Amino acid sequence: MLDPARQPDLRYRLIGLERSWTPLESPTQRQIDYTGLAPGQYTLELADFDPDAPLSGPARLALTVPAHFYETGAFRIALGLLGLLLIWLGYLWLRYRHARQRAELERLVEARTRELQAANARLEQLSLTDPLTGLHNRRYLTQQMPLDLSFYAREEAFRDGREALVLALLDVDHFKRINDTWGHTAGDLVLKQLGRLLKTLMRSGDYAARWGGEEFLLMMRPLPRGQLAEIGQRLCRQIAAHVFDLGHGQTHRLTVSIGLIECPLFPDHPQLLAWEQLVTLADRALYAAKNAGRNRWMAYRPAADVAFPDDITVITGDPGWLVENGLLERFGTTAPTPPPAGDGRPPPKPAAPAAD
């Protein structure tokens, strides 16, 4: 029975949070506070612990503490998924950044490679070009002539000996007088203009190179054999007809001496002489033209009825012994090339080619 005069010994506990009982602070306490409770189901129990006359059984009150949105399982799953997504996005961003860096590096490497290739090409071109005349130089010929011979060897007319390359070595007559009279600057102007003139006198596929000093070597692609006289005479005439500017209002005409040779020299033995040996023979013909009075051309050809044994395929060394032993004959003009019309001198009759 509840006795109003008796003060009960009331205690409470919150099942789900604690096991022990907590006494009320005063019999008049009407409120119990719990803070920071985790979401979940709780039961508040209130009991009388008076040993003399306890109240029958504890009073119970079921409580539910709802979870905040960030405390729900769905939120934790979403948060985990978001974390995984951020990690994936971070991985993708790193891949993208690395890809951009790699692409930029490749672009830079490619640009530097192109620049280096262009620089090397310019250096290669400079190394193959005579700086004064803009023509090719000896180094170019050393590289190009074997390629040309290999290329033309595939042509039937060249292979069976009906056609041949023509090598023409020309030298400016009395060039030292130009340097001594008008100076080396005038001499350089003459060489530059002669280089340009030679380009205009050649066909597509032909080329000219400065062989050294005032000497130039012309390589003419395959022609029918037997045209050396026409080529030599035409070059001498057209160069003699050209007016060269020496600067400061001065002009000058000049002549050249030319040595010519066909390549290969012996149709039945195309490998008998290397192209360098043929240039040596052209040089020998050139100096024969010089000694004959300049302003003319000379050439070498096989002597009549010359035959080599089949087992002789290559001749090494100086080919001059072919001339000395009568295996080659020299032919060319016996008189200077007629001067161009309009210089005050009547042109002499053209000289016929003569063999010696």
Image (tube, helix red, strand yellow):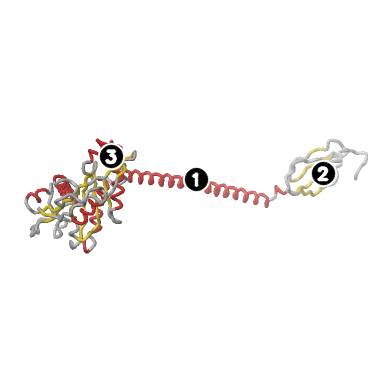
Viewer-side residue, 101 vs 199: 199
Q: Residues within 10 Å of mark 2 (few under 14, many from 20)?
A: many
On the image, which quarter does residue 214 sit in? top left
Which residue is denoted by mark 2 in the rendering?
46
CB-based contact (under 8 Å), mark 2 and mark 1: no
Residue at (43% x, 47% y) in the render: 110
Q: Which residue is mark 1?
A: 101
Q: Which mark is residue 254?
A: none
First reached walking from the N terminus: tag 2 or tag 1: 2
Q: Secondary structure at mark 1?
A: helix
Image-quadrant location for residue 153? bottom left
Find residue 237 and report its horizontal and vertical position in percent: 23, 52
Left/right placement of residue 293 relative to residue 245 reads left
Q: Is residue 180 above or below residue 230?
A: above
Q: Amino acid at mark 2?
A: Leu
Q: Residues within 10 Å of mark 3 (few under 14, many from 20)?
A: many
In the displayed structure, 225 sits above or below 218; it is below
- Which of the two marks, 3 or 2, is nearer to us in this view? 3
Q: Position of residue 311 (x, y in %)?
A: 9, 57
Residue drawn at x 33%, y 43% is: 126
Mark 2 secondary-structure assignment: strand
The amino acid sitting under disc 3 is: Gly
Mark 3–mark 2 distance (CA, rounded to whole Å):
127 Å
Image location (x, y in percent) of residue 192: 31, 44
